Structures are given as C-alpha cells and as structure tokens.
Image (cartoon, rainbow, N blue to C red):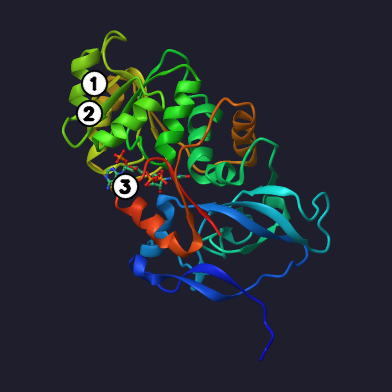
Amino acid sequence: MSGKKTMKALVLRKHGGLDELEVVSDHPLPAAVPGHVVIRVRASSFNYHDVFTVRGMPGIKVPLPVVVGLDMAGEIAEVGAGVAGWKAGERVLVNPLNKTKGLMGEMLDGGMAEYCLVAADQLVAMPAGVSFEEAAALPVAYGTAHRMLITHATVKAGDRVLVLGASGGVGTGCVILAKHLGAEVIACTSSPEKMHRLKELGADEVVNVKQVDFSKWAIERYGKPQRRSYEGGVDVVINFTGGDTWHPSLRCLKRGGKLLVCGATAGYDPKEDLRYVWSFELKIIGSNSFYDDDLRALMALIADGKMRPVIDKVLPLAEAREGLRLIQDREVIGKVVVAP
Ligand SMILES: NC(=O)c1ccc[n+]([C@@H]2O[C@H](COP(=O)([O-])OP(=O)(O)OC[C@H]3O[C@@H](n4cnc5c(N)ncnc54)[C@H](OP(=O)(O)O)[C@@H]3O)[C@@H](O)[C@H]2O)c1
C-alpha cells in the first residue's frame, strides 16, 4: 500500500466522444504548493468549450489525462507557502485562466473533482448572498457575456439586440444583461420550450430558428435596413454560432449596427459578404474571455438581487457526463452545474 491520498474526479483519458470521460475515485488528491491553494470544490459548471476539449481542437495539445471543468467555486481547504491574503474556509470563485499554464480543465486539472489546486492569483472572493452554484455558473459564459456587452460598452438602453443561440450559457447571459441595460431583446432559439423559457427570462421577442429565417423575420418586423438613413433592421446582433448564421446576421443589421462575436459553435470560416460591412457601415466587434472585474461585477449584481444566472440542472459528479451530453445535444437552457 502506497498510502497515497485519492479523490473522485471526472477525467478525460483521450480525445473522442463523451465515452472517453470517466468518473474515477483514484485521482491523486492535490496538495498545496507554494503560491497555490487547494479548494474543496462545491460547484463546477460545463461550457460548450468542454465539448471541444473532449473532441480535441486543432493546435491545442491537452496533457491527458486531465480533469475537465473550467468553472468552479468552493472553499479554501489548504493554503500553500507564500500565499498572502487568503485563509482556509474562505468562499472563492476561480478565474479558470492560469497565467503560466493556460485554461484549467484543459491545460491543467479543472473543477469537476472533489478538490482542485489553484494558483492564488486566480481566486476571486465571493460576496455573501451568492451561492456556490451561482458563482460556478459565471466565469466562461456570463463573464464573456459581461465583457462583450458591458465592459466593451456595446449595448445601450433602447437598442434592439438580437441574440442567436440565446438558450445557452453565453446566450442566456446576453439576454439577461441586455435586458438589464434596458435593451429590447430578440432571443433566437431552437424549440418551443426554449422560446417559452426565454420569454420568462425577459426576452421581448422569441424566434424559432428551426422554423423561421431569423434575418427575414427581423427585416419583416423592423423594416429593411437603409443605406442613407438609420431606419430598419436591428442595432446589434450577438453571434457566437458562426457557420451559416453569419451572412444572415449581416443582412438584418441597421446602418452603423454592431455584430458582436465571441465564438463559432457551427463553424469559424463562414460565407462573408463585405458589401454589407462597408455600405451599411457595420462594426464587427470581437470579444474574448473575461477578467476578474467582470466576475466581481456579476457577483455584485447577484448579491444586489439584480440578476440570477440561469441554471438548468445541478447534477452529482456521478452523473456529470450526462450534463455535458445535454450541452452537446442542445438540450439545455442556461447552465449545467455539477456539485462534487
Ligand atoms: N471567446 C470566448 O472567450 C468564449 C467564451 C465562452 C464561449 N465561447 C464560445 O461561445 C459559444 C457558446 O458557448 P456556450 O458555452 O454558451 O455554449 P452552449 O451553452 O452550448 O450554448 C450555445 C447555444 O448555441 C446554440 N447551438 C448549439 N450548437 C449549435 C449549432 N451547431 N448550430 C447552431 N446553434 C447551435 C444552442 O442554442 P439554441 O438551441 O437556443 O439555438 C446552444 O444552446 C461556443 O462556441 C464557445 O466556444 C467563447
């Protein structure tokens, strides 16, 4: 007997399908090293990014096996040497970007485990009034939505904002934050159940993209965008889907409109039409990732009762793989959280 301490974790052994993910009970329990803490994970959430990690992405060499899960919140269990300002028992949210190694849950062990080793400079204090589940739902999805809409100041009160993929993590974040800013929101999604839920979340209009061409719908509803006036179309389209949604997004934007992009779930090299970009003076605005300030601002909104992240399900670690299947198969509204 080696006496080595172990823990339960959701481990990706090799790239492929979701079958390559396995809950094991013999993953080495991390110990605090200088500059780091060990947290007891109380909640972790999935993102579409985890689907890409399981499949494997060109140009990204994941050191396998790896514990997946980028987002996590928990309590500090052990503090390593040289860590100032943090003590055992404190409630923390983790910014998943490790400054030397890259993203947790991809380039180093992530949050789908009982414990996790985290560099102290990745910790963000959780205010009272924010639950572990809510905090763990934030970083990748809501943090990105916050940066795209609020930090970059792209949406203002009265804007007509069309959100594609509105039911997902980033999508529900965009719907909620755009409403918070006073915008009129058109939520585009893929089923009647999701339409119903998005209405409940405050969307002014909902469009089923499986039945309706969202771009034609917007042009019929608001008028054809004009080259010589600011009439017709929508002010902002939020598109992290790419693929065949890109070209129709250009068509329904009003003169001077903004196309916000932070991802490409359905393809990163879509058909382009530059004529729309110059003749309607469109602005294509990229946004990447999120910073501690985005996470603090989101937790303050929750603590003040101004926002709640949308959590579809909270699953035990033993059922975590099913949570990622739901995201892969587009059966989720908001976030799937795992409570190890
Ligand atoms: N750059 C960054 O920092 C950053 C950060 C976070 C996320 N992202 C990217 O943003 C995208 C969304 O991430 P997420 O975690 O929010 O994903 P998610 O929770 O799975 O939501 C994506 C939504 O898009 C729609 N969708 C899914 N697959 C689709 C497909 N093949 N074709 C068209 N629509 C599809 C679905 O909405 P409906 O059923 O409602 O249509 C789904 O709910 C991903 O591509 C992700 O990599 C980038």
Q: Nearer the viewer, residue 162 or 44?
A: 44
Say whether residue 225 is left or right of residue 339: left
Badge 1 vs badge 3, beta-carbon distance below 8 Å: no
Badge 1 vs badge 2, beta-carbon distance below 8 Å: yes
User: To which residue does mark 1 refer?
Assistant: 218
Dot 2 falls on a residue whose secondary structure is helix
Name the N-terminal-most of marks 3 and 2: 2
Horizontal and vertical percent position of residue 285: 42, 32
The image quadrant where one finds ligand 1 is: top left
Front label number (1 vs 3): 3
User: To which residue does mark 2 refer?
Assistant: 214
Say whether residue 119 is left or right of residue 278: right
Say whether residue 265 is left or right of residue 207: right
- Kind of residue at disc 1: Ala
* Residue 331, numbered circle: 3
* Image quadrant occupied by the N terminus: bottom right
Which residue is at 64% across, 26% downward?
304
- Kind of residue at disc 2: Phe
Horizontal and vertical percent position of residue 57: 38, 61
Dot 1 falls on a residue whose secondary structure is helix
